[in-house]
Image: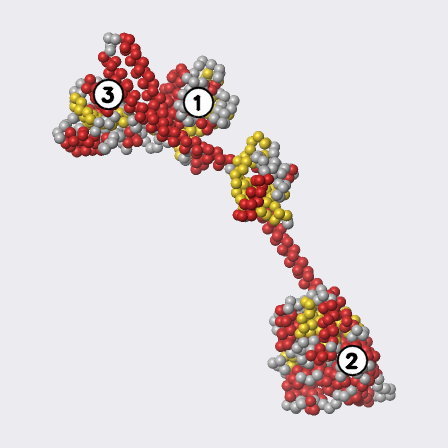
């Protein structure tokens, strides 16, 4: 029934002749273990290979070193950063790779911090053994590591010289900004006084035609005042508070126009080369500012040249990508570049950070004011551009002025040149809180035939109009206590819709919330002004 | 089937063994050499009482080894004890087994080793070549003169639910070292001496007539038959005689070498079924069944049985086959009776009703595969009936 069928096969198995009948010992077991070990070792080897790739793929330099400073291991980035080779990197100690001395106290502090925090990060100066004269700014992160059983440290070193440079540049533009505010404030206050001086001098000059001696003296006063006003204008330019009349402009045309003037600035031994770019984009800018930039840069270049050399002025289009942010003040976009290059002595590294500061000069007293580059800087920033300086001591300097390309079409051209100054008989309501300036302006206008009603108080002016005063023109300061110029104008306009207005201000129109340069026939006059300028502005305002 | 065997390719498996008085004392040294650290010492209450277990444990500890003892092995080891031992082996983190005892203890130790190395249940490994992974090193110190589990590739475990003994036959269960010390036999009583001695005799006879016998196994089988036949009576009568004990121990070893390589026959097939059912001593079952199976096989291998007869010391000169056959059977029956094993299965509680079941289990035993005359289930049932 259920008897095993194949006794003979069973017999063979029992006596050890079956396929599975060999006696197994631990030996195959051991072989399996050895194979497993081999496999583990292989995967370890592969994992180590991967880690090595990572180790060498990092941008930061990595040192493994002991507490005595002997270097045990380093990655490829370390070799590149310190300019050593696989063969030589162990020849130097951590001390050799450091610019400053590593004192015992320093090491003790490190030990203490590592015990407390587990890691430590500090800024340091790295030294390349083959190039000790050019240290690198680095940031070092240190941790403890057990390196093949030895107590060691792993130091990860990051080159931060680029970041340092950017930080320095940022500091510089912040410093220039605050200097600008200060300079702008001072220039502003002195402007009013200069206005008074110039105004009264002009009045006196009208009446002293018969007295040549007195006239000469008055001319001197007027010249000095105008010179101060000029300095003030430069300071305001630096402070980006220069009143401007921007217009559609092609730099090639403007530079072309200034060639003659620029040539007069330099001496005969110097060459002035002019290389306009074809198809140059337009900018939206006040042409006189371009002149200011060119004059200052070319004069500086001339001063740097010595007895002979070349100054090259060139233009170019440039488009900056996302990496524009690496340059100070720069943003991505299209730019028109105006370059002034000289083959002069170059700018030493230690003064480079200061050249844009107002009143910074290396020139003998009387030869330089230190306002040239400050003016250029203010103008360029006011126009949303930035400056790149490349200089090589002994070989020359290039100032590259980047001005934003004018986007879109052609805006309305600016007003034509002002006609000769003329007086009139209309009634003018004059409001100016600086009483001495109020008096000056009133005198100039009255002398020119106008019927002037004047007051330092805008509220009083408003009351007069409410009480029936109906002047043809309101000439008013902008910034005043109580009620500002535009506010006063708003109030009066509702009562006297046909009335004209002229704003007088030390700030550019754009700073006052008024669209530049004129809007809806609103007149605007930048302080300080000469007699002619005031009369012209009043006439213009009346005839809109 | 006789000399044709010479042409067959053969294998002979035997462990390293040390034979002689006080061989047991080498347990510590061997355990250490085999890489042991945590030792599972398996023994049973009888051997413990005789003092052998403690002596071996002390020897192991003297070698700096840690010993965990597993002493709960009953006369016929069951699957449940094996599983218990294997759990202990793993829990104690053992890496080497030392067995001190008779066939039960050594079979249990083999079972523990198999389960510890292969997991699962011990019953999963029943049959031939069913043990995949080699087990931890095993040192056997036999304390009875007959089972020869210390040199064999057999492990016999009782299947509790089926009430049958299963045979695990595999080279994986050949111990690594056998320390065969005749002195351990001195504590056996007369009846146990008789039963285990008769087991050795059955091993030798079945190996010799096995259809898988070989010249090498023949040599050991005949020598074992001669030794048992010559010394068993005296040894049961004089348990304290070390020289007689040594002869019986040697007989057991030789019989073990023979049957481990030539396998057994239907006596063991039937004894396994009977022992599993009635919880009778293995040697006793063998002794009760042997003459009947010899009679059943005789005509298939008369020449072989004649040589057995000669080894037993029968004078067969001038006898024809039939006369020789009864002389030899008589001799075996006499020997059995003289050693104190008397009466039949009925006297030991076996009922006629049990026979179909016993035969049904016995016919499945792999030992039948090498019996010279392939039996049927009914043959086995008839043989049980004769042995009643
Ligand atoms: N092209 C140049 N080459 C060398 N140095 C220059 C050049 N341009 C400007 N500098 C340096 O920058 C300083 C500041 O320039 P600037 O603001 O124009 O003032 P100033 O010309 O009155 O000294 C100059 O004194 C000079 O040291
Ligand atoms: Fe047996
Ligand atoms: Mg200058």
The residue that disc 2 covers is B186
Q: Quadrant of the C terminus of chain A?
A: top left
In this picture, residue A411 sits left or right of residue B40:
left
Q: Are marks 3 and 2 on the same chain?
A: no
At 43% across and 34% down in the image, what residue appears?
A170
Tell which subunit mark 1 falls on.
A
Q: Is residue A407 visible?
A: yes
Q: Is mark 2 within 8 Å of ligand 2?
A: no
Residue at the disc numbered 3: A440
The answer to which quarter of the image holds residue A320 is top left
Which residue does the numbered mark 1 point to in the structure image?
A361
Q: x, y percentage for residue A354? A: 45, 27
Depth-wise, is mark 1 or mark 2 nearer the camera? Answer: 1
Residues tagged by mark 3 and mark 1 found on one chain of the structure = yes
Instruction: Using residue A170 as the reference point, say whether residue A456 is left or right of it.
Output: left
Q: Relative to A534, does residue A162 appear above or below in the rendering? A: below
Indicate the position of residue A67 as horizontal and vertical percent values.
61, 43
* A249 w.r.t. A66: above or below: above
Q: Residue at x 29, y 13 (%)?
A: A218
In the image shown, does B82 or A323 lie closer to the viewer? B82
Q: Nearer the viewer, mark 3 or mark 2?
A: 3
A460 left or right, relative to A376: left
| Gap in angstroms between the C-alphas marked 1 and 2 | 121 Å
Q: Quadrant of residue B29?
A: bottom right
**Residue A255: x %, y % from top left:** 38, 22
């Amino acid at each position: 029934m259920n008897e095993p069928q194949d006794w003979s096969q069973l017999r063979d198995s029992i006596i050890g002749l079956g396929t599975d009948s060999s006696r197994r010992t631990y030996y195959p077991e051991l072989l399996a273990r050895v194979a497993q070990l081999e496999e583990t070792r292989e995967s370890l080897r592969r994992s180590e290979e991967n880690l090595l790739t990572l180790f060498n793929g990092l941008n930061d330099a990595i040192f493994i070193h002991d507490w005595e400073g002997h270097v045990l291991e380093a990655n490829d980035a370390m070799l590149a950063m310190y300019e050593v080779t696989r063969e030589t990197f162990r020849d130097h100690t951590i001390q050799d790779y450091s610019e400053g001395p590593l004192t015992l106290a320093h090491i003790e502090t490190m030990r203490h911090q590592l015990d407390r925090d587990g890691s430590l990060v500090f800024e340091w100066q790295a030294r390349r053994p083959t190039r000790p004269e050019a240290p690198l700014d680095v940031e070092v992160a240190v941790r403890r590591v057990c390196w093949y059983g030895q107590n060691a440290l792993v130091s990860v070193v990051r080159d931060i010289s680029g970041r340092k440079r950017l930080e320095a540049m940022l500091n510089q533009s912040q410093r220039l900004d605050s200097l600008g505010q200060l300079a702008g404030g001072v220039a502003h206050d002195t402007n009013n006084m200069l206005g008074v001086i110039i105004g009264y001098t002009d009045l006196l000059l009208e009446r002293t035609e018969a007295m040549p001696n007195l006239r000469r003296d008055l001319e001197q006063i007027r010249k000095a005042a105008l010179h101060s006003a000029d300095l003030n204008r430069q300071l305001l330019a630096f402070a980006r508070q220069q009143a401007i009349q921007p217009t559609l402009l092609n730099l090639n045309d403007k530079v072309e126009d200034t060639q003659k003037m620029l040539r007069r600035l330099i001496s005969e031994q110097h060459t002035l080369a002019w290389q306009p770019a074809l198809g140059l984009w337009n900018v939206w800018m006040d042409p006189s500012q371009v002149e200011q930039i060119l004059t200052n840069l070319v004069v500086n270049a001339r001063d740097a040249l010595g007895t002979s050399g070349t100054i090259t002025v060139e233009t170019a289009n440039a488009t900056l990508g996302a990496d524009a942010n690496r340059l100070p003040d720069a943003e991505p976009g299209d730019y028109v570049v105006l370059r002034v290059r000289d083959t002069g002595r170059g700018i030493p590294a230690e003064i480079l950070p200061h050249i844009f500061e107002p009143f910074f000069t290396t020139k003998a007293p009387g030869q330089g004011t230190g306002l040239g580059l400050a003016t250029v800087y203010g103008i360029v920033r006011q126009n949303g551009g930035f400056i790149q300086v490349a200089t090589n001591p002994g070989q020359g300097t290039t100032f590259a002025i980047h001005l934003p390309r004018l986007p879109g079409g052609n805006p309305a051209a600016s007003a034509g040149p002002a006609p000769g100054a003329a007086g009139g008989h209309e009634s003018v309501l004059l409001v100016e809180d600086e009483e001495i300036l109020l008096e000056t302006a009133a005198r100039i206008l009255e002398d020119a035939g106008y019927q002037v009603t004047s007051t330092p108080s805008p509220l009083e002016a408003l009351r007069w109009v409410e009480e029936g005063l109906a002047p043809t023109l309101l000439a008013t300061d902008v910034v005043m206590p109580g009620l500002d110029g535009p506010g006063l104008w708003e109030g009066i306009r509702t009562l006297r819709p046909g009335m004209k207005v002229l704003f007088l201000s030390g700030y550019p129109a754009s700073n006052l919330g008024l669209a530049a340069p004129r809007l809806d026939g609103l007149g605007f006059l930048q302080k300080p002004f000469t007699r002619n300028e005031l009369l012209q502005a009043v006439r213009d305002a009346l005839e809109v | 089937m006789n000399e044709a065997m010479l042409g067959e390719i053969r294998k002979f498996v035997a462990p390293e063994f040390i034979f002689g008085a006080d061989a047991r004392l080498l347990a510590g040294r061997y355990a250490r050499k085999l890489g042991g650290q945590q030792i599972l010492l398996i023994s049973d209450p009888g051997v413990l009482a005789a003092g052998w277990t403690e002596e071996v444990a002390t020897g192991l500890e003297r070698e700096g080894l840690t010993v965990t003892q597993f002493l709960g092995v009953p006369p016929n080891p069951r699957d449940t004890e094996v599983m218990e031992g294997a759990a202990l082996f793993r829990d104690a983190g053992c890496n080497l087994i030392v067995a001190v005892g008779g066939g039960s203890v050594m079979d249990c130790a083999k079972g523990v080793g198999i389960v510890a190395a292969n997991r699962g249940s011990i019953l999963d490994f029943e049959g031939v070549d069913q043990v995949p992974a080699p087990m931890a090193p095993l040192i056997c110190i036999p304390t009875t003169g007959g089972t020869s589990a210390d040199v064999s590739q057999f492990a016999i475990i009782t299947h509790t639910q089926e009430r049958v003994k299963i045979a695990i036959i595999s080279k994986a269960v050949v111990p690594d070292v056998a320390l065969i010390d005749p002195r351990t036999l001195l504590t056996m009583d007369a009846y146990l001496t008789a039963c285990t001695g008769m087991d050795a005799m059955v091993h030798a006879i079945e190996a010799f007539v096995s259809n898988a016998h070989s010249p090498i196994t023949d040599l050991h089988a005949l020598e074992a038959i001669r030794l048992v036949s010559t010394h068993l009576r005296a040894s049961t009568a004089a348990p304290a005689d070390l020289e007689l004990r040594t002869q019986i121990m040697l007989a057991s070893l030789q019989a073990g070498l023979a049957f481990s390589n030539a396998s057994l026959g239907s006596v063991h097939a039937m004894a396994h079924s009977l022992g599993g059912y009635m919880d009778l001593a293995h040697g006793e079952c063998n002794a009760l069944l042997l003459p009947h199976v010899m009679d059943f096989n005789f005509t298939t291998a008369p020449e072989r049985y004649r040589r057995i007869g000669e080894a037993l010391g029968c004078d067969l000169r001038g006898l024809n086959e039939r006369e020789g056959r009864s002389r030899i059977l008589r001799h075996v029956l006499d020997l059995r009776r003289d050693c104190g094993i008397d009466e039949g299965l009925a006297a030991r509680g076996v009922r006629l009703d049990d026979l179909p079941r016993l035969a049904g289990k016995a016919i499945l035993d792999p030992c039948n595969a090498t019996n010279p005359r392939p039996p049927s289930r009914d043959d086995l049932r008839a043989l049980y009936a004769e042995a009643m």
